[in-house]
Structure formats: C-alpha cells, structure tokens
C-alpha cells in the first residue's frame, strides 16, 4: 500500500473556471477555415463535429478528471459516463472510445484495473468499442475517455440554437457536487450519496434517443459550469431565459448541505463568472448554490418548442428519468437569466 490519497475531490469540480478558459481560447490561432468543421470551440459546445459526407458527420470529444468517490470501480463508471455524455448532447451515437489514464506506478495496479473495468462496462452499455488508450505515470489518479461518435449533419443538436418561446427541460437532478463535497467531509447520508452515484453513472444515451423523436432546437449537458453556466452558453448573447427554481429537480439533501456551507470552490468560480447575467427573485442561498453547483455526468438541458415540451418531458419520466420543465426561453432582455 502507498500513502497516496485516492480521492482528494475531483469530477467536474476540477475543471478550469469558465472565465479563465475563455481568455485562453480567444488567443489561440484559428488556422485555415474548413467548411466541413460544423462545430468547433467557438460556440463552446460539448463536442467537435466534422462532416465527412452529406449523411455522416464525426463527433469527437474527450473528458477526464480526478476521483470524486472512493470506490475505483464506481469512479471508472462515472468518468466514462461523463465523457460519453458529450456525444449524446450532440444527438449522436457512440462508436469508439480510448482510455486516458494518469496513475502513480507505486499505487496498487488492481485499483487501476477496477477503474478501467468500470469505464469499459459503460462503453459497452453505450454500444461503443473500447479501442485502446494512453497512460502516463503521474502523482495523482486521473481517468477518462476520448470518444468518437457519428450523427447525420442534418440532426446535430448544437448548444446555441434555442428559439424564443422554447421550454427548457432538465433530465437529471442537480446537487451531485455538493453531495460529494459533503461526503468527503463525512457529512453526507448514505441515501444522498447513493442517489448522487446513481445519477452520475446513468448514461444520457436513453434521454438522447428519446429526444430524436421530437423537434429539439438545442441541447447541452450540464457539467462543470453548473446549470447557470451552461444555460448562459445556450443563450449565446441572443436570448434570455426564465427559470422556475421550484421546478428544478434536485437531490433533496443537497439543499441541506448547501445550507450547512458544504460547498465547492468550483461553484464559487461559476458564481463569479455568471452572476452578472442573472437576476434572482427572493431565492434562498441554498437554491442559488444548487444552480451554480458543478455537475459531474449531469443531465441534458433541452430547449424545445412549447407545443412538444410536455410530451417529451412525460416520455423521459416514463423512462425513469426525473425530467422536468424548468423554465422558458424569452426575447433578449436587460438581464440574461431570471430565476424566480
């Protein structure tokens, strides 16, 4: 055994803040324009999309992070589900995945085996093929996947194509970041942690497949920037939104832990970046924190016409998801996001 700590706090709370990342990305050289690159990093979307033919586009993403739970096998499942989610947020199907591994050589290699077992099982569930990967000796554990998918160029779900009058649907509960923080502090109940793990290990595959029956206008997955950050990206400076806080699905105990100030530094980075765009109307502090809470392997945030919204939400619920209509897209207003 080594003295290396397996779980120091990770998942999507380990992401760089949106503000810092934006400053770096805007300085990168653009290179020569390619009309076949349908989605790049300009829109801060979930994955890159490159058109191969009139009927096939390749979707490419990668995601990895340190452990946020103590069990290696569970961590592997969560990390894989999180990486695969970007493919589903684009409306695509998974085809191949590659492991990304950072692992200390002096740590028990059986731990690495369990991590990769969990990841492999999720790739299989996704219908993809685990085709290889890359590993390096590192001081801390990190794991994730690089994933390729395919989609029709006519069926891509971008994150910034919402329309005025759309309703917003969220497919998973918020609060996993706060619950994991409470767990590391020894304050989380087993029931709350079990609920968080079940949410984080659930693939967005099934929600994505249901969405394809409807005329979805925009979609993203809610991860490290929290609901408010990813909604800000969805509105893309063109639109505003009204969120009904009481309709947002939440892990119940997460509100209690937020009231006890069991918070993440990542949520505070999210607040610092996005609060300038938000008007809260008599919202309790704990609810605000839930809305800024970074989600690991969070749900899909779907923008769809009001005439189809309830039908989609009902079908998602019938499939076992805690999906709910949480608000609507409005014309651009003085403030970007209103929360009541």
Image (spheres, rainbow, N blue to C red):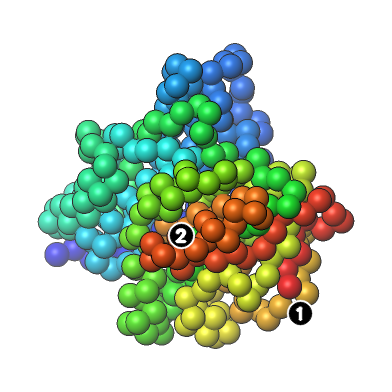
Query: Which picture quadrant has residue 184?
Result: bottom left
Q: Which marked residue is nearer to the observer: mark 2 or mark 1? A: 2
Whether label 2 touches label 1, CB < 8 Å = no
**Residue at horizontal 18 percent and vertical 52 percent from the top:** 117
Q: Secondary structure at mark 2?
A: helix
Residue 282's mark?
Answer: 1
Residue 336 in view: yes
Q: Secondary structure at mark 1?
A: loop
Residue 219 placed where, x, y %?
56, 47
In terms of depth relative to the viewer, which is nearer, 203 or 230?
203
328 in relation to 123, above or below: below
Image quarter (top left, top right, bottom left or bottom right) of the C terminus = bottom right
**Residue at horizontal 77 percent and vertical 44 percent from the top:** 238
Q: What residue did someone put label 2 on?
A: 315
- Crowd band around label 1 with a 10 angstrom C-alpha radius: few (<14), some (14–19), many (20+): few
56 in relation to 256, above or below: above
Image quarter (top left, top right, bottom left or bottom right) of the N terminus = bottom left
Q: Is residue 138 left or right of residue 60?
A: left
333 in relation to 175, above or below: above
- Crowd band around label 2 with a 10 angstrom C-alpha radius: few (<14), some (14–19), many (20+): some
Residue 20 in view: no
Q: Is residue 292 left or right of residue 181?
A: right
Residue 50 placed where, x, y %?
48, 24
Query: Which picture quadrant has residue 168?
Result: bottom right
Residue 244 placed where, x, y %?
68, 70
In terms of depth relative to the viewer, which is nearer, 145 or 28?
145
User: Rounded to the nearest whole Å, what is the CA distance between mark 2 and mark 1?
Assistant: 32 Å
The tag earlier along the polypeptide, 2 or 1, is 1
Q: Is residue 87 left or right of residue 144?
A: right
């Amino acid at each position: 055994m080594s003295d290396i700590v397996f779980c120091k706090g990770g998942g999507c709370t380990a992401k760089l803040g949106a503000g810092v990342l934006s400053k770096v990305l805007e300085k990168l050289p653009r290179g020569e324009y390619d009309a076949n690159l349908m989605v790049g990093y300009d829109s801060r979307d979930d994955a890159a999309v490159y058109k191969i033919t009139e009927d096939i586009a390749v979707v490419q993403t990668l995601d990895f992070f340190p452990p946020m739970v103590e069990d290696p096998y569970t961590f592997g499942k969560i990390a894989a589900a999180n990486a695969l989610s970007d493919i589903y947020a684009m409306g695509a199907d998974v085809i191949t995945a590659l492991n990304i591994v950072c692992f200390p050589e002096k740590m028990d290699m059986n731990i690495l085996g369990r991590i990769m077992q969990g990841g492999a099982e999720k790739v299989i569930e996704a219908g993809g093929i685990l085709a290889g990967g890359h590993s390096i000796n590192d001081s801390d554990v990190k794991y994730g996947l690089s994933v390729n998918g395919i989609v029709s160029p006519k069926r891509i779900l971008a994150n910034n194509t919402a329309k005025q009058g759309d309703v917003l649907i969220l497919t998973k509960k918020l609060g996993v970041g706060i619950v994991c923080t409470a767990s590391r502090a020894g304050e989380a109940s087993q029931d709350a942690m079990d609920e968080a793990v079940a949410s984080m290990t659930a693939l967005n595959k099934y929600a994505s497949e249901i969405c394809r029956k409807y005329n979805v206008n925009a979609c993203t997955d809610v991860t490290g920037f929290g609901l408010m950050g990813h909604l800000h990206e969805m509105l893309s400076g063109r639109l505003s939104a009204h969120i009904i806080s009481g309709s947002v699905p939440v892990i119940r105990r997460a509100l209690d832990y937020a009231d006890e100030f069991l918070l993440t530094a990542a949520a505070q980075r999210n607040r610092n970046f996005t609060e300038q765009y938000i008007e809260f109307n008599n919202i309790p502090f704990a609810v605000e924190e839930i809305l800024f809470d970074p989600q690991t392997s969070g749900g899909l945030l779907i923008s769809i016409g009001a005439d189809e919204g309830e039908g989609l939400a009902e079908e998602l619920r019938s499939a076992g998801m805690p999906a709910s209509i949480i608000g609507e897209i409005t014309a651009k207003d003085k403030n970007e996001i209103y929360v009541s």
